[in-house]
Image (spheres, rainbow, N blue to C red):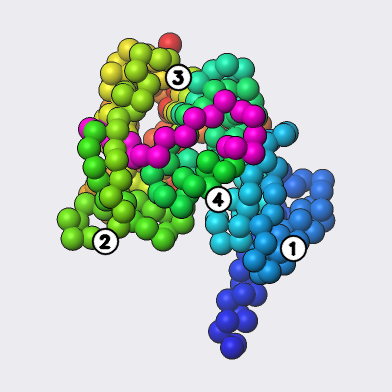
Amino acid sequence: MTGTRTTAAGVARQVLSYVWTHPANRGRRLRGIARATRFQIRGRMGLRTMATVGSGGRMWAELHCAAASKVVYANPPDWNEMQAWRRLLRPGDLFVDVGSNVGAYALWAGDAGAQVIAVEPAPDAARRLRENVALNGYPIGVLQCGLADRPGRMTLSRGEDTTNHLLFDPDAAGDTIEVDTLDEVLGGRAVAGVKIDVEGAERLVLEGARRALAEGRIGALQIEWNARSVGMLGEDRSPIVALLDGYGYRFARPDAAGVLHDTDVTPTSPRDIFAVLDR
């Protein structure tokens, strides 16, 4: 009992701190706390909450779905990165959300007027993604598959919410998923932006986009940048740096206004990194 209460109290403190300090709630922190409290109460009653993404997007949020919960707590949740896409995307641009989960980035881009391809292999997340896309009138297509360096089939973990990942152990239990390449998904199309969040396998996605990269058809990329690739592929992020540098990309991180600033690249970092084609 005591351990349960302590854990619940700790989670509550984390949520309150997140809401209170998040830039999206600046000037309306008490309203944000009230919204988070209602969401928590409804979730414990088994009810979902409708959350707003951007100025007019909508998505369903469930208590134990981390990606959707963050949208309830702050719109947008990844403040700097999502503000950067507001600056980068123009109406009619193509945006590809690789590892879309329940669709926060896809809906954010759709709300900005972009055409979106949302890629999500996990069955539960893909189901929620389709439901959220159906709530809105945005031009978003959903592909339920993984992306890697070659087409085929691979194994994906299950039951890990936003951290489901590819499994390379042939005896590992998971879901068998179809896998394609970004080059095949794009065909000959140019894309203004690609967000890649695949829990350490980001390099494989980029390897499968070499044709588009070589032809200068990808304007900007947002890449999850942490130590997950060490456990996944046995490497840090240096191969990504070399790959993108070879295709003429510069590396940057956004400030709170979404302005990209060139940055020195280290093998790991707690924040996503942007790669922008240096035309």
Q: Residue at x 82, y 56 (%)?
A: 30
Instruction: Please report whichever mark, 1 or 3, sits nearer to the chain's N-terminal start.
Output: 1
* Residue 209 screen position, x and y as percent: 31, 25
Q: Earlier in the sequence, mark 2 or mark 4?
A: 4
Q: What are the residue bounds of the magenta stretch?
A: 133-150
Location of residue 113 in the rendering, given as x and y in whole percent from the top left corner = 63, 22
Residue 228 vertical placement versus 89 (above, below): below
Which residue was labeled with disc 3? 191
Between the residue at mark 4 and the residue at mark 3, the CA separation in whole angstroms equals 24 Å
Q: Is residue 216 left or right of residue 222?
A: left
Q: Residue at x 69, y 47 (%)?
A: 51
What amino acid type is highlighted by mark number 1?
Thr
Residue 268 visible to an observer of this rendering: no
Q: In the rendered view, does 222 fall on the left or right side of 38?
A: left
- Give the x, y percent position of residue 41: 72, 67
Using the image, tell me which numbered label, if any, was put on residue 37.
1
Find disc 2 in the rendering and name its residue: 173
The amino acid on which the numbered mark 2 sits, given as a three-letter code, is: Ala
Where is residue 158, by image quadrant?
bottom left
Q: Which residue is mark 4?
A: 67
In the rendered view, would you say 37 is above or below 85?
A: below
